[in-house]
Amino acid sequence: MNWDDLKIFLAVAEAPSMRAAAQALKVSHSTVSRRIDALEGALNVRLFDRMPDGYRLTGAGEELLPVALQTDECLHTFGRSVAGRDDMLSGQVRLTLPDPIVATGHFGDIFLGFMRQYPEIQLRIDSSMELFDLSRREADVALRFTNTPPVHLIGRKLGNMHQAIYGTQEYIRAHPPEGPESDARWVGWGEPDHCPEWIARSPYPHLKVLGHFDSLDIQLAMIKQGGGIGFIPCLVGDCQPDLVRLSEPVATIDVWLLSHGDTRGAARMRAFRQYLLERAADIEAALAGRLHDKSLQG
């Protein structure tokens, strides 16, 4: 039996549709269909019923599923074990982290410093709010926003992400947000509603919202271009020389450095974690908005 075909079988069995399975595998729909046909031909049994709304496991497919799952887990366990015995300060460290961290100069300086100190270690950064599976080695190390880190991962809390209100000095002077008749506007994020909770809790619940954006990068660009004021992470706002802070930082969510126990023994993983942990005090201060004076001047 070809393991690649079994991997495709598993993806189709777990995905809501053939198209979703093809996207997850990063191959074409026709490739998935052809490989399933090949696997069924090799086994001389039908594994899926082709329904109008997608593929459905047959009785034989249901029998094969736990075998495929166990094989998949055994291969991933072996891969993690081998990676964990690696004692060379070379190779790749794949780091997954949320977009707000990428938008900061603080972590950028840390990553650059690490790469300069360990030139043989290739740091690959995947920025996404998607949760990569460390057990399947979709990433080696994760910086995650969570108050409840997964119990199967090992790590350390780096601090709590604080947020505050920021705007350009020019915008704030032209549109003072304090008065009830102020024409200042919020640059919003998330789903719009009558009065989002974050606005209701702010010092300026009376201000209207200019727009809502699902990207921190877009929200930040709108604020810097004089579109309004925004409630953004201090880690981001404090790195912008043209922004000033209008409120005290508010704690929001914990930030964790996480890795899988099977791979954390590799020398390159230890070196990366240690490099970050040696800077843990500064990271915690940056998350809390204590590294820079960003108050509005005169």
Image (cartoon, helix red, strand yellow):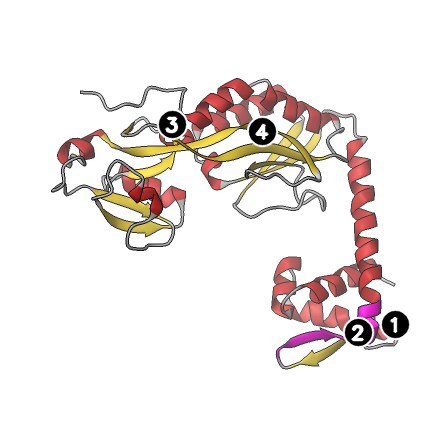
Give the mark nearer the N terminus: 2 vs 4: 2
Q: Evaluate if marks 2 and 1 touch, with contact meaning CB atoms under 8 Å apart.
A: yes
- Estimate how packed mark 2 is, as few (under 14), some (14 to 19) or many (20 or more) residues with alpha carbons within 10 Å: many
Residue 32 falls left or right of residue 39: left
Give the mark nearer the N terminus: 3 vs 4: 4
Image coords of residue 191 (percent x, y): 37, 54
- Estimate how packed mark 3 is, as few (under 14), some (14 to 19) or many (20 or more) residues with alpha carbons within 10 Å: some
- Estimate how packed mark 1 is, as few (under 14), some (14 to 19) or many (20 or more) residues with alpha carbons within 10 Å: few
From the image, tell me which residue sits under label 2: 47
State how far apart marks 2 and 4 are (Cα).
Answer: 45 Å
Q: What SS does tag 1 mark?
A: helix
State how far apart marks 3 and 1 are (Cα).
Answer: 59 Å
Question: Which residue is drawn at the image coordinates 85% and 76% (left, top)?
Answer: 45
Which dot marks residue 239? 3
Give the mark nearer the N terminus: 2 vs 3: 2
From the image, tell me which residue sits under label 1: 43
Q: Which of marks 2 and 4 is in front?
A: 4
Which quadrant of the structure image shows residue 224?
Answer: top left
- Is 219 drawn above or below residue 288 in the view shown? below
Type of amino acid under label 4 = Lys
Q: Nearer the viewer, residue 214 or 240?
A: 214
Residue 57 falls left or right of residue 23: right
Q: Which of marks 3 and 4 is in front?
A: 4
Which dot marks residue 157? 4
Q: Which residue lies furthest to the left in this view?
A: 181
Any magenta on residue 60?
yes
- Estimate how packed mark 4 is, as few (under 14), some (14 to 19) or many (20 or more) residues with alpha carbons within 10 Å: some
